[in-house]
Every structure is written in structure tokens, then in C-alpha cells.
Image (cartoon, rainbow, N blue to C red):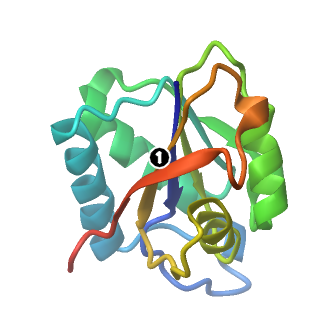
Amino acid sequence: MKTLYLMRHANAAPATPPAMSDFERTLTGQGVIAARIVGRFMKANRMQPDFIHHSAAVRTAETALIVTREIFGQKAPAGNPDKDLYNAPDDKLLAAIQAADPGHNSLLVVAHNPGVSELLSALGNVEHYCEPATLGVFRLNGDTWAAFGPGTVKLEKIFVPEG
């Protein structure tokens, strides 16, 4: 069985060109709190990703780090930053998931909207706009990520931190 934890990055500060580009945006205080809430939710529900894959943007890296530190403590596994996931559409996110190492049984993917919302809708057959820090949990009853896609997975949960 494979489990995907698909997450939109937490709330980020607006870009302030030319000092800060969109890629360099950091989390707000509210974003840090929301990421911690998601991490605590995952830990309380024994959701422990084997591999963390995130956009290389600062806000997604910060979100992934905060979430995994809540789950694993200071010995959280390092995330895998990927420039190709920066503002990636749903088909590019799905391709990255399908290319994952089959040795990993669970993935945490942290990326951006609209790609995350569109992929959540395509995989879960629901219309859902992902607020910042929304987490979707999907299960595939199979042994390869290549089979992961619409019609092959089950949406287990959508978690949106309050506040």
C-alpha cells in the first residue's frame, strides 16, 4: 500500500519586489502555526512519510521542515527540494509522484496552488479549493507509485487547520 500526503504550503508573506521575489517568500506567523498544526495532526494520526518532496521555493521548504519536525522532532528527514515543482500544474505534480522510488511507502509532497487543488480534485473526485496548509491523504492499494492516479486511489482525508 502507498500513501500520499499532498499539501499546499502554509500562508506566506507577499512578495516585495525587488527585495523579495515570489520564489523567496517566507511563511507568516500564521503560516508557521498552521504548519505546526498539520504536523501535530499527522503525528497524532501516525502519518509518517518515508520521503519528503517539495517545491524549492522558500515557503514550501519551510512548510515541509516545520511539518516534519513536528512529526519526527529535530531528527526530521531532509526534504527533497525540486525546482520543477515550483508553481507546477497538477499533471507535473502527478508525474513527480508517479516517478517516486517504489521503495518509499509514503510521500509528503508540498507544493503550490492551483496545482495542489487541481490534483486533489482529480484524485479525490471532489471540488475543493485548498486553503494554505490544506493536507489531502490518499491511499493506493498497490506497490508502485507509477499506478498512482485518478481512479486508482482513495481519498482518505482532507485536513484544513483552523485559524
| Residue lying furthest front | 151
Instruction: Return the residue at label 1.
Output: 64
Expressed as whole percent of the image width and height from the top left, the position of residue 129 reads 52, 82
Horizontally, residue 70 falls left or right of residue 91, namely left
Give percent across and percent down for residue 36.
25, 54
Does residue 118 appear in the picture of this structure? yes
Furthest residue in direction left, as rendered: 44
Left or right side of 110 for 21? right
Nearer to us in this view, 23 or 111: 111
Q: Is residue 66 left or right of residue 163?
A: right
Q: Residue furthest top?
A: 103
Secondary structure state at the residue bearing disc 1: helix
54 up-or-down from 130: above or below = above
Observer-nearest of 123 and 50: 123
What residue appears at the point 37 percent right and 37 percent down from the top-left corner? Answer: 68
Q: Nearer the viewer, residue 52 or 139?
A: 139
Q: Amino acid at mark 1?
A: Ala
Residue at the spot 48% in from the left edge and 80% down from the top edge: 13
Residue 72 position (above or below residue 64): above
Q: Is residue 91 above or below residue 47?
A: below
Badge count: 1
Is residue 83 visible in the rendered image? The answer is no
Q: Residue at x 20, y 80 (%)?
A: 163
Q: State the residue at coordinates (42%, 67%).
A: 134
Residue 77 locus on image (x, y percent): 45, 24
Q: How many residues crowd around disc 1 within 10 Å: few (fewer than 14), some, or many (20 or more)? A: many
User: How far across and how far down the image is residue 119, in percent?
Assistant: 67, 64
Q: Quadrant of residue 143?
A: top right
